[in-house]
Image (cartoon, rainbow, N blue to C red):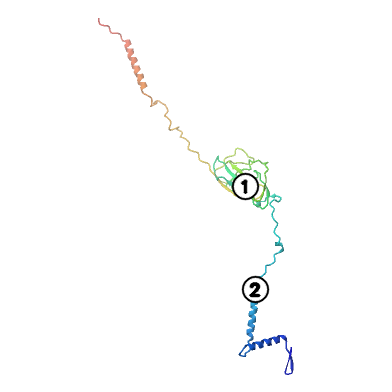
């Protein structure tokens, strides 16, 4: 747009025209005739810009897209899949005793359990000679512990016992210790255990690390009762002797003496001559 001022044509750009129009409007709105300050207009513009920025910051952001590898669910576990050998992480081996105070002649009953804690079924070879309870005098694992007894010493070494355990399945067996010592091969004439503190533990052969917690036992031997005195039974009757039985009836001896006196009198009467009779 061009306008002619005093014979000179002046070219006015569009932004300049808008600014002039705003200026005229501002002048018309002020009754005192003063021109509006440009600083106020700048402040209004700054406020508008800040408002736009605040809305952009507080506006909820859209959720990020899900990665492609997380869209598909994991493969389900088949509990009936082909069984593989159980690992130590799949098994929980337990040991419990019916009592912890052991005395001679009263066997201790152990309960052995094998549980599958995994998510799939697995196979475990658990014959009685391979699932052995061992009793030590002292603490299990200590160099000073002495092996006293094991359920594997007298078990059938040819036994086969393969277990298929599903998730959560438990196999339970019982073993008794008759407070006797044992050696591999089930040798006879073993000495009795010594009184003291003992520990017991079960381990599954062929599965490294499949062991139970330790069970603690106390073995005591009762003291024998006091023997009777060597002088004999104090309550017995006194033995016979020169004094005789004090309870005997003394009348027997009196009668014998009377008989003796009568015999003497009779002899005297026989020896004496009869006196002559008077005429």
The secondary structure type at the circle numbered 1 is: strand
Above or below, 179 relative to 22: above
Residue 77 sits in which quadrant? bottom right
Rounded to the nearest angstrom, the CA distance separating label 2 from label 1 is 62 Å
Q: Which quadrant: the C terminus?
A: top left
Residue 61 sits in which quadrant? bottom right
Where does residue 9 sit, x and y in percent of width and height? Answer: 74, 92
Residue under the image location 36 percent in, 22 percent down:
251
According to the image, label 1 marks what residue?
113
Return the mark for residue 57: 2
Q: Residues within 10 Å of mark 1 (few under 14, many from 20)?
A: some
Where does residue 168 sit, x and y in percent of width and height? Answer: 64, 50
Most extreme residue toward the bottom, as rendered?
6
Between discs 2 and 1, the one toward the N terminus: 2
- Viewer-closest of 34 and 259: 34
Residue under the image location 35 percent in, 19 percent down:
255
**Which of label 2 and label 1 is nearer to you?**
2
Q: Residues within 10 Å of mark 2 (few under 14, many from 20)?
A: few
Q: Is residue 11 left or right of residue 183?
A: right
Residue contact at pointers 2 and 1, CB within 8 angstroms: no
Above or below, 182 relative to 78: above
Where does residue 33 sit, x and y in percent of width and height? Answer: 62, 90
- Viewer-closest of 28 and 103: 28
Q: Which quadrant: the N terminus?
A: bottom right
The secondary structure type at the circle numbered 2 is: helix
């Amino acid at each position: 747009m061009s306008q002619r001022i005093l014979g000179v044509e002046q070219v006015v750009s569009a932004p300049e025209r808008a600014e002039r129009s705003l200026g005229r409007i501002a002048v018309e709105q002020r009754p005192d005739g003063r021109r509006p300050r440009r600083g106020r207009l700048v402040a209004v513009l700054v406020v508008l810009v800040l408002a736009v920025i605040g809305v952009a910051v507080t506006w909820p952001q859209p959720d990020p897209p899900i990665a492609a590898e997380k869209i598909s669910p994991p493969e389900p576990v088949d509990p009936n899949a082909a069984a593989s050998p159980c690992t130590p992480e799949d098994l929980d081996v337990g040991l419990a005793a019916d009592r912890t105070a052991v005395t001679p002649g009263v066997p201790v009953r152990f309960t052995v359990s094998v549980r599958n804690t995994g998510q799939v079924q697995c196979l475990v070879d658990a014959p009685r000679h391979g699932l052995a309870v061992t009793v030590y005098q002292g603490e299990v694992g200590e160099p000073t512990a002495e092996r006293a007894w094991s359920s594997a010493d007298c078990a059938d070494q040819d036994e086969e016992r393969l277990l298929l355990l599903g998730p959560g399945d438990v196999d339970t067996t019982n073993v008794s210790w008759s407070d006797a010592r044992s050696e591999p091969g089930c040798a006879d004439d073993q000495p009795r255990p010594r009184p003291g503190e003992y520990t017991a533990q079960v381990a599954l052969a062929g599965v490294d690390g499949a062991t139970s917690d330790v069970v603690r036992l106390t073995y005591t031997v009762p003291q024998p009762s006091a023997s009777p005195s060597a002088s004999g039974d104090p309550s017995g009757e006194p033995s016979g002797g020169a004094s005789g039985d004090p309870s005997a009836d003394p009348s027997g001896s009196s009668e014998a003496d009377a008989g003796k006196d009568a015999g003497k009198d009779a002899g005297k009467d026989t020896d004496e001559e009869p006196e002559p009779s008077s005429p």
